[in-house]
Amino acid sequence: MPNIKLFASLRKVTGTKELSITGASAGEVISELVKRHPDLAAHLLENGQIRPHVIITINGHPATDMDTLVTEQDQIAIFPPIAGGQGEYL
Amino acid sequence: MKGWNGKVLEIDLTTQTHKSYPLDMQMAQQFVGGRGLGARLLWDLVGPDVDPLSPENVLIITNGPLTGTGYQTSNRFSVTTKSPLTGTVLDANSGGFWGMQFKKTGYDVLIVRGKSQKPVWLEIKNSELTFHDASELWGMRVYALTEKLGQNNNKRNVLCIGPAGENLSRIAAIMNDRERAAARGGPGAVMGSKNLKAIVVEGSQRPEIDDKERFKFMLYETRKLLAASPLTSQALPEFGTVVLMNIMNNIGALATRNHQQTQFEGAEAISGEELTEKYLVKNAACWACPIGCTRISKTDKVEGEGPEFETTWAFGAQCGVDNLPAIIEVNSLCNDLGLDTISAGSTIACAMELSEKGYLDSDLRFGRADLLARCVEDMAYRRDLGAEMADGSLRLATKYGHPELSMSAKGMEFPAYDPRGMQGQGLLYATSNRGGCHMRGNMVGLEVLGLPKLIDRFQVQGKSSFVILHQNVSAAIDSLVVCKFTNMGVADEYFARVLSAVTGIQYSTGDMTRVGERVWNLERLYNLREGFTAKDDTLPARLLQDAPTVGPSKGWVVKLEPMLKEYYRGRGWDEYGVPKPEKLEALGLANL
């Protein structure tokens, strides 16, 4: 089970900083995480996809492909959107 | 033309005289205000023969056409001078209330020349200037002095130096409104060298706005834009700038122990999350700012503003310290003494490495939180080793035979971002006109946060174009002068529309980045005239040769040379980093 680290407002939503979740890919892990903590959906997902500007890293590198396979040695870090919106409403 | 007051106040401290004259409006239109206008004035006033701490150096304080209008974050002012730390052109800007109040006195620019025989403080009340004897105030710390001189956020505002500036520390800040700072590059020492302790402003003149209806709508629109951005509406108000600590650590770009590592095992203990949970009292905001990123924090010993991310990093990860209360307390002490927290923390880290390696005989060691306050006091009063540390890490490391241990560019200490994990940040540091600085462009947005889109932080080819664009935008925003955080929610081209509404001059799309490019090239010309060359566009050997052995940035160094070549080409400069005549012609700088 990959190790998941949560940051900023995600800690308040889940009540935890760190947890382990089963999943073969990054996408599966996120899905399982949201199942376990449904309130996270509003923070992480938009139309079933990862919200723009949510930062997800696998071992410190950006998780640009949710099909990336993960193992129990991997660490997934999730940060809520802390940037974005520039020019999108003009 | 509206927006600007159209007036300059020039003071000669040597003769205790002053004069007021019209602002050159052609110059104002070309350089707008703040950093740009300051650099243009400095070009005429301070040449290469001038020692930064001599009476011949000047202190130029500028606001901009938006200042005091009520536009979001239009509270800032800029200080321009020749830096005693780097010898380069310097501007440092600051928020709070003072800039807005200075604009209300009826001036756009304050130029301070010469040196007073005795300590003096200045009071500007609605265009009227009074010189006051400051003999009894000399030696006072910032908090007590600010209160004594009658600080009242919306009515009367105090700008001053603390003991660090009086003692000519080359990393001394100018403080305003108690805890805001024009910090970097040693402007406090320039003020101290002039025997000028404080400038108090009180005014009632509102800047005129050309198209009030359009401007009113823009206030509404900007409020919506800032509310729509997660950074300006949620992350900054909730966690402050320190929210970056865990992010930078996670990706392996958090400079640690004087840049010996790129991850800090104690990052969580000094993070924004920790600060919010255990030490936050409340949020606060500068004048006309809906973001409110200021944190009022409290320990058993102190309560006050901050610490910001860079400060928390400088006394934290960079010094190997994971004691957040100690960092909060040393931040407060730096503000009270008037010291730049980034340079102070990084200079202590440099001394720690020199000591651990046996080059310097001192008890400083990484992780010694208990020594931070003593070091800072010693720097401000030039006591013991503090006398050497007061002039920054490069002079300290050079004295002890190891200049390569100063983590600086052009003599100014870097902020938190280790460029081995962010190639664009490395180019940004190397080419910054005031030295190692993160406020000369925002590569963290692009390379880490995905603002507006995420780019590969290890990419080298093509990176220079992003750096150039962000340097130009940053110079434009500094010339307005507004807070860079607004640009996290408001696109830079939007500012052209605001500027048009306020001034009545039509600034079009592209004009703001053109202003920024003009300012950047002017600053470059200034540094070239001072004797800087392409050889100074570099980084410490550690960042160019020593790759981290663990973490996400493992194996990476800054690949500066190819980026720099591309950068010079992209800037329209020759291979020696000198702007080509056609570039200067295009920017309206050919006559300099």
Image (spheres, helix red, strand yellow):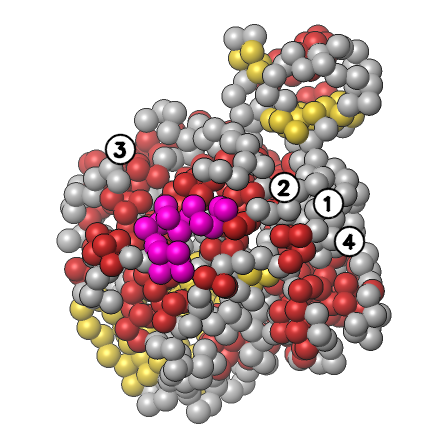
Residues at marks 3 and 1, CA–CA distance in whole angstroms = 51 Å
Pick whichever, B470 or B439, lies toward us: B470
Relative vertical location of residue B369 with respect to residue A76 in this rendering, above or below = below
Task: Evaluate whether residue B283 shows in this view.
Answer: no
Q: Which mark is residue B168?
A: none
Nearer to the camera, B342 or B151: B342
Q: Residue at x 24, y 79 (%)?
A: B19
Mark nearer the N terminus (2 vs 3): 3
User: Would you say the residues marked 4 and 2 are in contact, meaning their CB atoms lie under 8 Å apart?
Assistant: no
Query: Quick one: label 1 or label 4, which is nearer the N terminus?
Result: 4
Residue range highlighted in magenta: B562-578
Q: Is residue B461 magenta?
A: no
Q: Is residue B222 above or below residue B301?
A: above
Q: Determine the secondary structure under disc 4.
A: loop
Tell me the CA gap for discs 4 and 2: 19 Å
Q: Secondary structure at mark 2?
A: helix
Q: Quadrant of residue A36?
A: top right
Q: What residue is drawn where x is 61% and y is 16%?
A: A65
Q: Separation of disc 1 and disc 4 at Cα?
A: 16 Å
Task: Give the residue number, with chain letter if any, for mark 3.
Answer: B217
Q: Say yes or no: labels 1 and 4 on the same chain.
A: yes
Horizontal side of residue B25 vs B356, given as left or right: left
* Dot 4 amino acid type: Gly
Pinpoint residue B189: horizontal percent, then vertical percent: 52, 75
Label 2 resides on the chain identified as B
Q: Which residue is mark 2?
A: B421
As drawn, the label of residue B320 is: 4
Q: Mark 4 and mark 2, same subunit?
A: yes
**Where residue B548 is drawn, which disc sits there?**
1
Spatial separation of the CA atoms under disc 2 and disc 1: 9 Å
Amino acid type indicated by mark 3: Phe
Q: Nearer the viewer, mark 1 or mark 4?
A: 1
